[in-house]
Amino acid sequence: MVPVATLPAAAILMGVGYWLDPTGWGANSALAAFLIKAGAAIIDNMSVLFAVGVAYGMSKDKDGAAALSGFVGFLVVTTLLAPATVAHIQGIELSAVPAAFAKINNQFVGILVGIVAAEIYNRYSHVELHKALAFFSGKRLVPILMSVAGILISFILMYIWPAVYGGLVSFGEGIQGLGEVGAGIYAFFNRLLIPVGLHHALNSVFWFDVAGINDLPNFLGGQASIDAGLATPGVTGIYMGGFFPIMMFGLPGAALAMYHTAKPQNKEKVASIMIAAGFASFFTGVTEPLEFAFMFLAPALYVVHALLTGISVYIAASMQWISGFGFSAGFVDMVLQTRNPLATNWYMLVVQGLVFFGLYYSIFRTVIIKFNLKTPGREDDDAEEGAVAAGSAETGELAKQYLKALGGHGNLENIDACITRLRLTLKDSSLADEKTLKALGAMGVVKLGSNNLQVILGPLAEIVAGEMKKIPVSEDLSSVKLP
C-alpha cells in the first residue's frame, strides 16, 4: 500500500490540471501543463514505485536500505530483460523476441522485486563480514545481494515470463472480451477478495499495464491518452466508473440500515462506528472499515454486496456513465475528474448512486431483520459486554490494550500495518483474544495460516502499529485494563 498511497498526489495534480484546461490538456495553459505532467510523472513510473515501496513497506524496520535494494533489483531485472538484451543473450533477432519482454516494466515485476528485496533485507541486514570487507557489512550488504538476486530473477523470468504474461493477457482479454459483463464480473471478484487483501492483485491486471488494459493510467492521461490512441471515451474507465455509486452511496445506505436495525441500547455505539465508516467510504472511497463491520458477522450480506457491486459496474459500463480515480471511488476523486475528457456522463453516476443507496438500505434492512443477522449492535448480550469505540481511548493507551490482547511483545514476531489493517506475525495465535480485540474497536480479525493475523482497525491502523512498536519490550502490561 505504500506505492498506492502516492496515487492521490497524481490524481490531485492531474485533476486540477484538467480543471484548468479540459480541452487542451496543457496546450492552452502553462500551469495546467505543469500540473498534468507532474501527476503523469507518478503514474508513468508506478512500476519502480512498487519495487521501492513494497521493499520499504515489507522490511521489518522500514529502512531506506530496503527501498534502495528494491530500486537496484528493479534496474537489474528490467535491464537484463529488455528486448534488446534478451535478443543479445539468446542470439536471436530483435523481431523474434517475445512480446512479453516489451512489457517487462510493469507493476507485477515491481511487486516481485520489492518482495525479494524486503526478504533479503530482513534476513541479511545484520550480517557481519570479515574485517577486510567490514565496510560492506549490515545494511550495505543488502543492495549487493539484491543485485545478484536480480540476476537470478532475470534468468528465471527469461523462461517463465512469456508464459505468465500470456496467461495474464488471456485472462484480461477474456474478461475484456465480455465487455460490460466482464467489467461486472471483475467488480464482483474485486469485492470478494477484500477479506484476504488479494483484490490488489486482481486490480493490477485491469487497472495497470500487467495485461495491456491499463485502465487507470490511461484514464488519468485524459486527452493525451486519447491522442496517443491509448484511450477511448465511453470505454476507458469501465473498470472504475461503477464503483462510485457503491462507495459514495451504496455502502452508506448499508450503514444506515445497520444503524436502524441495531438494538436500542446499542444505537449510540453503532452510530459512532457507522458515521465514521460511512463518511470514509463516501468522501475518500476507503470502504474496508465499513465492509469489515459486517463481512464476518453476516457473510451472506457481504456476498449480496459483491453482487450489487458487479451489477453497478455493469450498469455504468453499459450506459457509458464513466469516471475514474487516482486512489478510490470517493467524492474527492469524482470532483477532480469531472473535467477529464474521458469522464463521460459522470453526473449520472450520482443518479445511479441515489438508486443504489435505496437498494442497499432496503435490501440490507430486510435481510438483517428476516434472518436475524448479527450485524453490529445486534450481537448477543455477552458479545456486546464492554464493547467500546476505538477512538474513546488515547492512541498510546489503546496500543497497549491491543498489545496485551495479542499476548504481549513476547508473542509478536512482527508488527506491520497497511491503510486499514494491523498485519501481525504471532508465535502462538491462540494467545490472541479475538473477543477483546473486537471490544477494543476492531472491525474484524483475519487469520492467515497458523501464525499470521490481520486486525481491521480502519484508518487508525498505522498509527496504532507505530505506537505498539514504541512500547518497550520490558514494559509491564499487567496494569493495562481491557474491556
Image (cartoon, helix red, strand yellow):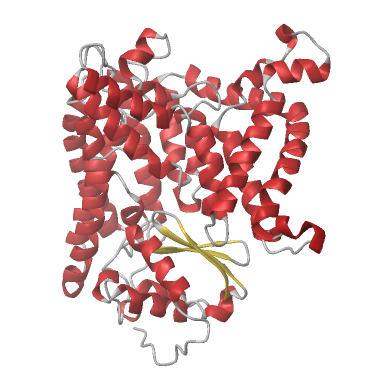
Determine if residue 353 is in view. yes
**Residue most toward the front?**
132
Residue at image position (65%, 39%) is 73
The spot of residue 140 in percent (x, y) is 66, 54
Determine if residue 327 is in view. no
The spot of residue 120 in percent (x, y) is 68, 53
Q: Against 30, is 372 above or below?
A: below
User: Is residue 244 rendered to the left or right of residue 295?
Assistant: left
Q: Nearer the viewer, residue 240 or 122?
A: 122
Dividing the picture into quadrants, the one containing residue 235 is top left
Q: Against 154, is 260 above or below?
A: below
Q: Nearer the viewer, residue 441 or 252?
A: 441
User: Is residue 301 rendered to the left or right of residue 95?
Assistant: left
In this rendering, the count of numbered labels is: 0
Residue at image position (32%, 38%) is 9
Residue at image position (23%, 52%) is 278
The spot of residue 25 in percent (x, y) is 27, 16
Q: Nearer the viewer, residue 366 or 62?
A: 62
Q: Nearer the viewer, residue 306 or 173?
A: 173
Task: Assign the C terminus to one quadrant of the image.
Answer: bottom left
The spot of residue 238 in percent (x, y) is 36, 24
Residue at image position (20%, 35%) is 353
User: Is residue 431 rendered to the left or right of residue 341?
Assistant: right
Q: Against 123, is 187 above or below?
A: above
Dividing the picture into quadrants, the one containing residue 181 is top left
